[in-house]
Image (cartoon, rainbow, N blue to C red):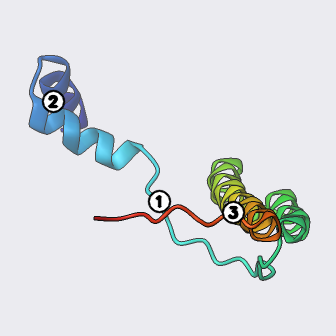
Amino acid sequence: MLAKAVEMAMGGNAQMMKFLLSRILPRERPVELALPRLDYAHDSADAMAEIVEAVASGRISPREAADLSEIISAFVRAIDITDAQMEIDALKSKLGIRPIESGA
């Protein structure tokens, strides 16, 4: 029966290809990991250490770790951009430069 399914897929049966791939490829799963709160960019070091430990102990896969690391990196960039904008606004205020109004 499996041989017939593979034969159909190899013959171009898209539905059978999709079915077989759904059985072969790993599915995403929820990852439960206690990461520290990220209030400041430097908090990401503790979060990354927890991710590395989770991979080392086999609780999560390297792919899951890479996905989590991407999320943390994006969050840190958002914190950095926000901090930089606040510093720019503070300097403008000290120099007496009014902020540019946005919107219609």
Q: Amino acid at mark 2?
A: Lys
Dot 2 surroundings within 10 Å: few (below 14), some, or many (20 or more)? Answer: few
Residue 4 horizontal/vertical position (percent): 15, 30
Dot 3 surroundings within 10 Å: few (below 14), some, or many (20 or more)? Answer: few
Residue 98 horizontal/vertical position (percent): 62, 66
Q: Amino acid at mark 3?
A: Ile
Residue 47 horizontal/vertical position (percent): 83, 69
In this rendering, which labeled residue sits more in front, label 1 or label 3? 3
Where disc 1 sits, the SS reads: loop
User: Which residue in the protein does label 2 denote?
Assistant: 4
In this rendering, which labeled residue sits more in front, label 3 or label 2? 3
The image quadrant of residue 73 is bottom right
Distance Cα–Cα, label 1 vs label 3:
50 Å
Instruction: Specify whether 97 is left or right of 8.
Output: right
In this rendering, which labeled residue sits more in front, label 1 or label 2? 1
Asked if labels 3 and 1 touch by Cβ distance under 8 angstroms, the answer is no
Instruction: Specify whether 52 is left or right of 13.
Output: right
Distance Cα–Cα, label 3 vs label 2:
74 Å
Where disc 2 sits, the SS reads: helix
User: Which residue in the protein does label 3 denote?
Assistant: 97
Instruction: Specify whether 29 is left or right of 86.
Output: left
The image quadrant of residue 84 is bottom right
Q: Amino acid at mark 1?
A: Glu
User: Which residue in the protein does label 1 denote?
Assistant: 28
Distance Cα–Cα, label 1 vs label 2:
28 Å
